Image (spheres, rainbow, N blue to C red):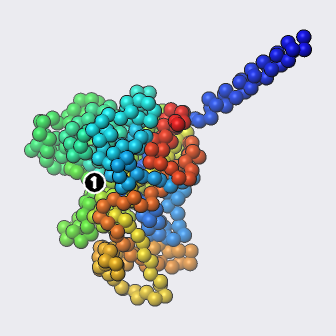
Amino acid sequence: MKITKLIIIVFLIIVAFTVCTKPVEETRFKKGSVIFIHPDGTGLSNWNAARILYYGPDGELNWDKMSNVGLYKSHFKDCLTATSHAGATVHSYGVKVVQDSYGLDGTEEITARSGKKMNIMQEAQVSGIKTGIINSGSIIEPGTGVFAASSVSRRNYEEITKKICESGIDVILSGGEEWMLPEGTEGRHGFGKRTDGINLIYYMRDQGYYVVYNKKELAEVPANVTKLFGVFALSHTFNDKPEEELKKENLPNYKIEAPTLAEMTESAIDILGRNNQQFFLVIEEEGTDNFANSNNANGMLDALKRADDAIGVVLDYQMKNPLTLLITAADSESGGMELLGKNISKFEKGSMVPKTDPNSAPVDGTEGTETDFFYSAPDQFGNRLPFQISWGTSGDAYGGVVARANGLNASEMNGTIDNTDIYKFMYLTLFGKLLE
């Protein structure tokens, strides 16, 4: 009798434990929307310089307001230094690939970290989640393009553009009109380069997309639009040349008629987040990378401010929509940028930055080499402190990439992370499953 009672008691304890713990496990991670902002080519030095220039040494970027930090390891299978197309492939599939990869592992098909032969955006689409991609550069740029297309070469521009247009992604905003139109066909921004005769803008209209070409048209998109295609430049929405060339050609950093990254982000969220539906939005500021590769400090800092403004749009959205994860990361540090400050007690006002540092590294002021120093926004003492930018390379470096997260499930990002973990954090929030 005593043994029977003991068995019953043990059984009841097991049942009670199972009942109490199972709901906790099921609700440990909530599902929600994900917004991934990728300021390409940016490391900690870039963020520090942007903060100092626009908000002062004691100020705060929107990026600073994000709650969690991950120190990002950016190596690949065959190289320590990242490329944009392989970096995006790792972000979209969650596994290591070789350095020359655009949605494939070199030329081989990828099984994603989830075990499926599709990237995370494709898996979101299959699950009924609304999707969007935004790029301040051309539609072919891999930071967003790899989430919609794959190719054996990143230079297969016609193929990549066609695949992105055929992807079914709900909102696509970028430049790159040249790869959407047949060769010789004039569009809103210039002439097409396609050799297959296909007009992809006509195709997108036939698929039910509302097409816009500039800032004004984007602001006037009707409230009932559910599929949006933005074509904002022939190539990029920016002019990625050294400062000296832009000055000679009287060109601004960014094309005036093109919307900013923040404006594109706001428009996309308005459509994708309608009626509290779950969505996945990937955003790339490409100018941060391209200006840095041109060793254009003025352009790079302008681009990074635009990326930070977009982060601000998402932080405001999160205040009213807490079931949203915001995550930011680059895949490398472009140009090896460093900020060099000058002591104001020894500084002669009107001084110009040198052409090079003593070690022959190129140096930039506000308009390039041998121009005025940059000045910080006022610090806590009211001082505007002079500084110059020094460049280590014209390529991409391993650098000090820092990932940030805010909002739903952001606490999972802590300490040192791998580049494959960006996928893991996004997957967790989209599907409620923490992958091994």
Q: Is residue 362 above or below residue 25?
A: below
Q: How many marks?
A: 1
Q: Is residue 74 above or below residue 252?
A: above
Q: Residue furthest right?
A: 2
Residue drawn at the location 24% of the way across and 64% of the way down:
241
Mark 1 burial class by Cα count in 10 Å: few <14, some 14-19, many 20+ = many
Indicate the position of residue 89 as horizontal and vertical percent values.
36, 43
Indicate the position of residue 149 as horizontal and vertical percent values.
30, 37
Indicate the position of residue 194 as horizontal and vertical percent values.
14, 41
Residue drawn at the location 35% of the way across and 39% of the way down:
147
Residue drawn at the location 47% of the way across and 69% of the way down:
52
Q: Residue furthest left?
A: 184
Indicate the position of residue 248 as horizontal and vertical percent values.
19, 71
Residue drawn at the location 35% of the way across and 35% of the way down:
110
Report the front residue among 57 and 12: 12
* Residue 232 in sight from this viewpoint: no
Amino acid type indicated by mark 1: Thr
Left or right: 367 in relation to 119: left
Secondary structure at numbered mark 1: loop
* Residue 308 in sight from this viewpoint: yes
Q: Which residue is mark 1?
A: 237
Q: Is residue 163 above or below residue 385?
A: above
Instruction: Residue 357: name its quadrant.
Output: bottom left
Check the picture and name the quadrant holding the N terminus. Answer: top right
